Every structure is written in structure tokens, then in C-alpha cells.
């Protein structure tokens, strides 16, 4: 209900907090105003918020929560502002602070890895509490990176003895046969995103040492056949491109003291038309089994550029119209 135009105020502790809140060239300020519909002006350390009652109240809640994040040394960026506004508009403002309290891992350069959305927080909780977790959602939702971070921390905490990362190489048939080098060389481009994440989390030297000792293994899915994977944290990435046979083969590799995370985007299946996705099949078969969790991430969990969210929403609308 609109209560008319109002003015609300917030006191900021110091100018440094105000600078962090408003951002370079007032970039953050403009985003808050755009997302809430309110006008915001700073008078020294006093922040005045003008607008329709609902808009001003929304902006005040968001600014309060963002200032609390700044006080805890959290960086404010455009994606966090938009998500904070969305949560506040849904009446879930307290979740803004809850999300940022859980440090999942620390990168080789000292950066803290944290959940950035409610969906990501649920996903991390599921990985801590279950033996097998399926994470299904679009690109940019942190499915793979968060799984890698959990794997690295499990290794550092001596919960497992090794990390195994794998992907199906969809092109590993005829077309790869014409490329030079052995199979590992041919499939390396498919595994590059996994290497990149490990480099960031561990650093190049540590990654190289652990790889040489066999503590970290990055390999195409075909290398998993016939093995029992014990005392390991295993991540299967791009699982939407597994056939039904490959998925069953992979899941039945699970050994003692092992955990599996299976990630994929069922809207991006690259298999030939005659092949069905093993990810879609196994989720319907296994959902509800104890110690197996299925987590769905959406465009709301995208933490890349805002355009990625808009692109995903546009495709969802397009595909929905096709089904009518």
C-alpha cells in the first residue's frame, strides 16, 4: 500500500563507510536508486532517503543491510545490490546477512569464498550433509566452483585423501581422433575450467605438486570405468552430457569414505539426438533416497554479469512459449 512521499534517514559511522556504500563514481548509489525507485542523498554521514513510502522503506532496509556488510569488511558490488533488493522486496531481508557469514574456503591469494545467494547457501549445506549431491542450474550459478572449493577444504581438513574431477568429453569420438596427441591432450580443453578453478583455490605450485603425487586427478569420464573411488571427493561436471549408461557407471564407482557432487545444466545438453541425458534420468530415479540431495539453482543464483541473468530469463520465456 502506498503511504505517499516520505523522507527517511540513516546515520553512517564514518565517511569511509559512505564511500564504500556509494561506490566509485556513485555506481552503487545509482544502482540502489534504480532498483528501489527511491532517491538517496548524503549529508556528511547522514543518508537521506526520499520517495514513495514503499520505495523509501525498501531502500532503507537495503542500505541498512549493505552497511552491515561493509562493517564486516564485505565488498559491495552491483550483483549483491540487486540480490539484496530482491530479497528485501520478498520480505527476506535478514537472509542478506546470513548468506555472507559462512566462509567455505580461502583461495591461494587469501580471498574468502562464500555463498552469494540463498540457493548457493542451500547447495553448500547439502554438500556438507550428504554423500551424493546433484546441482542443476544455468551457467554462472557457482555449481562447479563451489563444489571445487568444498573438495579442496575436505582435502585440507583430511576428510578425504584425494580429489577426483571429471567431465564427459562429448566430442571424444570421431572428431577428436583427428587432433594430434594422446587422449589426455585431446580432452584437456574440456577439462580446462576445472584446472582454472583449482589454480585459483590452491595456487599453481601446490596444484602441480598434488597432481604429481596423484592426490588430485583431473580426467575425462571414460577413465572412471572399472574403478572403485574410495577416500575421495569426486566432482562430475557438465553431467547433462553423460549418457544414461555413463551416469550409472559413474555413480556405481562410489567407494568407502567418498563423496560425490554432480553438476549440470539440463538446458544445455550437447548429446546427439538419439542419446538421452543420464542426468535427467538419474535425478528422477534417485530423488528421495537418504544421503542423496538434489539442489536446483536458478537465474536468481547467477553471480556473473547482470546480463547473464537477463539472457537466461529471455531463453526461459522463449522456451516456455515454444512449449505452448
Image (cartoon, rainbow, N blue to C red):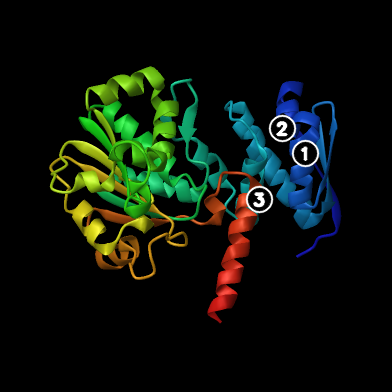
Quarter of the picture containing the C terminus is bottom right
Q: Secondary structure at mark 2?
A: helix
Report the disc number at residue 21: 2
**Residue 265 position in % (x across, y down):** 44, 57
Q: Are marks 2 and 1 in contact (CB under 8 Å)?
A: yes
Q: 224 and 183: which one is in front?
A: 183
Q: CA distance from mark 1 to mark 3?
A: 19 Å
Which of label 1 and label 3 is nearer to you?
3
287 versus 166 height, above or below: below
**Residue 35 position in % (x across, y down):** 74, 51
Q: On the picture, is 69 further left or further right than 195?
A: right
Q: Secondary structure at mark 1?
A: helix
- The reply to whether residue 130 is in sight is no
Which residue: 44% across, 32% down? 196
Q: What is the quadrant of residue 121 in the picture?
A: top left
Q: CA distance from mark 2 to mark 1?
A: 7 Å
Q: 36 and 57: which one is in front?
A: 36
Q: 18 and 232: which one is in front?
A: 232
**Residue 170 position in % (x across, y down):** 36, 53
Quarter of the picture containing the N terminus is bottom right
Which residue: 75% across, 51% down? 36
Residue assigned mark 1: 29
Amino acid at each position: 500500500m502506498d503511504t505517499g512521499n516520505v523522507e527517511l534517514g540513516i546515520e553512517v559511522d564514518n565517511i569511509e563507510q559512505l564511500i564504500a556504500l556509494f561506490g566509485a563514481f556513485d555506481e552503487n548509489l545509482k544502482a540502489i536508486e534504480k532498483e528501489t525507485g527511491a532517491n538517496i542523498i548524503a549529508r556528511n554521514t547522514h543518508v537521506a532517503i526520499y520517495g514513495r513510502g514503499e520505495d523509501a522503506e525498501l531502500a532503507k532496509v537495503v542500505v541498512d543491510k549493505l552497511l552491515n556488510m561493509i562493517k564486516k569488511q564485505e565488498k559491495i558490488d552491483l550483483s549483491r545490490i540487486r540480490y539484496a533488493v530482491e530479497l528485501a522486496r520478498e520480505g527476506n531481508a535478514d537472509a542478506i546477512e546470513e548468506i555472507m557469514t559462512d566462509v567455505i574456503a580461502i583461495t591461494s591469494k587469501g580471498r574468502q569464498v562464500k555463498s552469494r545467494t540463498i540457493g548457493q547457501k542451500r547447495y553448500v549445506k547439502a554438500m556438507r550433509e550428504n554423500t551424493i549431491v546433484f546441482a542443476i542450474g544455468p551457467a554462472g550459478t557457482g555449481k562447479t566452483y563451489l563444489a571445487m572449493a568444498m573438495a579442496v577444504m575436505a582435502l585440507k581438513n583430511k576428510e578425504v585423501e584425494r580429489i577426483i574431477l571429471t567431465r564427459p568429453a562429448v566430442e571424444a569420438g570421431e572428431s577428436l581422433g583427428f587432433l594430434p596427441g594422446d587422449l589426455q591432450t585431446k580432452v584437456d580443453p574440456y577439462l580446462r575450467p576445472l584446472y582454472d578453478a583449482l589454480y585459483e583455490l590452491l595456487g599453481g605450485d601446490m596444484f602441480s605438486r598434488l597432481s604429481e603425487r596423484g592426490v588430485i586427478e583431473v580426467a575425462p569420464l571414460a577413465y572412471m570405468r572399472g574403478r572403485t573411488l574410495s577416500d575421495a571427493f569426486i566432482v562430475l561436471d557438465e553431467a547433462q552430457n553423460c549418457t544414461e549408461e555413463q551416469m550409472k557407471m559413474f555413480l556405481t564407482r562410489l567407494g568407502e569414505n567418498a563423496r560425490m557432487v554432480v553438476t549440470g545444466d539440463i538446458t544445455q545438453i550437447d548429446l546427439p539426438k538419439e542419446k538421452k541425458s543420464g542426468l535427467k534420468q538419474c535425478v528422477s530415479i534417485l530423488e528421495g533416497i537418504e544421503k542423496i540431495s538434489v539442489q536446483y539453482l536458478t537465474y536468481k543464483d547467477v553471480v556473473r554479469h547482470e546480463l547473464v541473468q537477463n539472457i537466461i530469463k529471455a531463453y526461459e520465456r522463449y522456451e516456455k512459449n515454444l512449449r505452448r
